[in-house]
Amino acid sequence: MHRSMIGPIAAGVAGMSSAVNRFDRAAARTASPGGADDVGAVVDQIAAKNDFAANVAVVRTADEMVGTLLDIVA
């Protein structure tokens, strides 16, 4: 794989990992007894879900580009 294609894929995977971690922290805040900021935690979960989806789109696009490049070269 060409080096320039590894960057976007790695960035997308790192972004997905970060979004999962943020979602998990927000979910733990939501589930904790006596959570003072349940609304903020739910908003954080939604934001993390959207961030995850955006990073999936980055990885898919990079994967499609690699496939197109391989088709051109082949």
Image (tube, grey):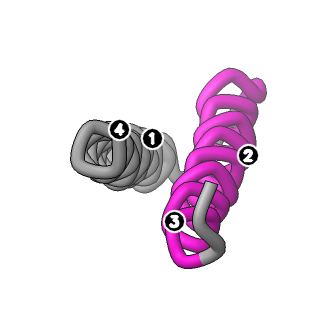
- The image shows residue 58 at horizontal and vertical percentages of 34, 54
Alpha carbon distance from label 3 to label 1: 30 Å
In the rendered structure, the answer to whether residue 17 lies left or right of residue 50 reads right
Q: Can residue 39 be seen?
A: no
- Going from N to C along the chain, the mark reached first, 2 or 1, is 2
Inspect the magenta stretch and tell me whether residue 21 lies in it.
yes
Residue beneath label 3, please?
Answer: 5
Judge from the rendering whether residue 30 lies leftward or rightward of residue 39; answer left or right: right
Find the distance from the CA under tag 2 to the CA under tag 1.
10 Å
Query: Which element carries disc 1, helix, strand or loop?
Result: helix
Q: Could you classify mark 4 by the number of other residues whose Cα lies within 10 Å: few (under 14), some (14-19), or many (20 or more)?
A: few
- Tell me the magenta residue range: 4-33
Indicate the amino acid at tag 2: Asn
Label 3 crowd (10 A; few <14 / some 14-19 / many >=20): some
Q: Quadrant of the N terminus?
A: bottom right
Asked if residue 68 lies left or right of residue 35, the reply is: left
Q: What secondary structure do most residues of the magenta stretch adopt? A: helix
* Disc 2 from disc 3: Cα separation: 25 Å
Numbered badge on residue 21 = 2
Q: Amino acid at mark 1?
A: Gln
Q: Nearer the viewer, residue 46 or 15?
A: 15
Q: Name the kind of residue labelled 3 in the image.
A: Met
In the rendering, which numbered label is found on residue 45? Answer: 1
Q: Nearer the viewer, residue 19 or 54?
A: 54
Kindly identify the residue that appears in the image at 70 percent across and 35 percent down: 24
Residue in the picture at 54% in, 77% down: 4
